Image (spheres, rainbow, N blue to C red):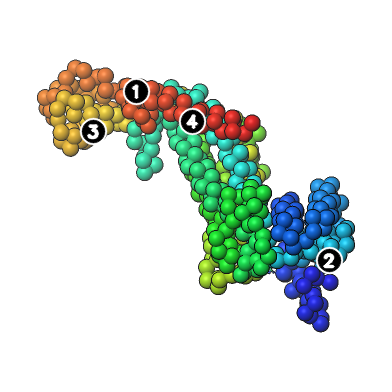
Amino acid sequence: MSLWGGRFSQPSDEQLRQLNDSIDFDQALYGEDIKGSIVYARALATAGVISADEAETIVGGLREVLREFESDTFAFSAADEDIHTAVERRLIELVGAVGGKLHTGRSRNDQVATDFRLWCRKAADELTAALRQLQAALLNLAERHQETLMPGYTHLQPAQPITAAHWLLSFFWMLERDLHRIAAAKARMAECPLGSGAIAGTPFPLDRDAIARALGFAAASQNSLDAVSDRDFVADLLYANALCAIHLSRLAEDILLFSNPAFGFITLDDRYSTGSSLMPQKRNADPLELMRGKTGTVIGALTGFLVTLKGLPSGYNKDLQEDKEALFGALETMHRLLPVITATISSLKLNAAAMQAALSSDLLATDLADYLVRKGMPFRQAHHVVGEAVRLAAEAELNLPDLPLPRLRQLSPLFAEDVAAVFDFGNSVRRRSAPGGTAPQALRLQIAQARAILDEYAEDCV
Ligand code: ARG
């Protein structure tokens, strides 16, 4: 017998019941549901809708239901449609008819909107913790490779020398933006829908702000019609999560490329590599391919849910029940990936010699143009002159630094003996010392800022 059966003369069709039931997945919300109900029972008493004794009986019963869930002894009944009906059904079994007073003025619409917001706030914190660990792994590795030089790529073509630390830290800052997005999403979840009823608000004199505060929200929601059907917070989290996955997919792609023997920049630890059933020599980077591949699934959860929202009429609609599986699935995927990606990064071996060997002297062409600029030539002209020098060197089958000085001086009299100092990868990197650049001096600042962010987070956690 369902909690809403009075109006019907026949039970629901069994296949519809199975389709409609959300208990299989929304039981994950039991803690939030019971917490919300405890606060709501007390608010009913404060408003004089039920007596203080009745409220305490209900609270006692809810605590017992919570114990049953936590000790894995909660017995589901076939009629438990969702977590809300399951908790209420069990409450009434435990405390009797007075338990039936709990749902006064409340609807599952404001109830689930409240529960899921509470769950999402917790989920935002868990995702944050996992991402902080990945940031720490990137930072630790970067600290060890401040002097390791490698080619930086644009259009995937060798562009300019950079340090490996600079490359690694670029992902630290992508994750930092992701963390800001997650924090912003959490901040936007700060309004409490409870007390909105099914759609029109509650006819009982509830102190909605007190309810909101007791549940850790900043305020009560402003409009009951909006509050019961607002799932922006789910879309926000799905988006923050998807963009984060995209960043990690790009990191995975870099590492896949750099661990290819054609590059040989990186060796994956055996524990995070896989082999081939046919080709004995193979060392594959499956964790990174899974990161890249599952990013598609995580993006799918976002786009799928956005399509669910599109075109919904005002008020609660059952379509909204899709919110939970979308978000649960996307977050579970990330929580399975993140520890493996973090450990993969922590155990990466960077082959400094191979990285250095991949630096070819034409990566210093920009530095050569800058040399002429320092001697007073407009950059556009310097770019042209160095372009000619690159072409001359190629025609003579020489590396750029091996072009004789007289040949360079035919292109511009500004070339002099001191041009030799340009052809040094370390000098090229060291010159890029303005904040945000790849020079060790700028890197030290970057690393200090990154470290301060992680330290501050660690302090907030204790
Ligand atoms: N299981 C539902 C959900 O997740 C709970 C709300 C049901 N509300 C209703 N009026 N049937 O959305």
| Label 3, ligand 1: CB separation under 8 Å | no
Q: Residue 430: which disc? A: 1
Q: Which amino acid type corresponds to the residue marked 3 in the rendered image?
A: Val
Alpha carbon separation for disc pair 4 and 1: 20 Å
| Label 4, ligand 1: CB separation under 8 Å | no
Q: Please name the residue that numbered disc 4 is placed on.
A: 450
Q: Residue 32: which disc? A: none
Instruction: Nearest to the eye among marks 4 and 3: give it.
Output: 4
Q: Residue 159, position in %: x, y?
A: 34, 36
Alpha carbon separation for disc pair 1 and 2: 70 Å
SS class, disc 4: helix
Q: Residue 417, position in %: x, y?
A: 19, 17
Q: Please name the residue that numbered disc 2 is placed on.
A: 78
Nearer-N-terminus badge (3/2): 2
Alpha carbon separation for disc pair 1 and 3: 23 Å
Residue depicted at x 50% and y 43%? 180
Mark 2 neighbour density, 10 Å: few (under 14) some (14–19) many (20 or more)? few
Q: Which amino acid type corresponds to the residue marked 4 in the rendered image?
A: Ala
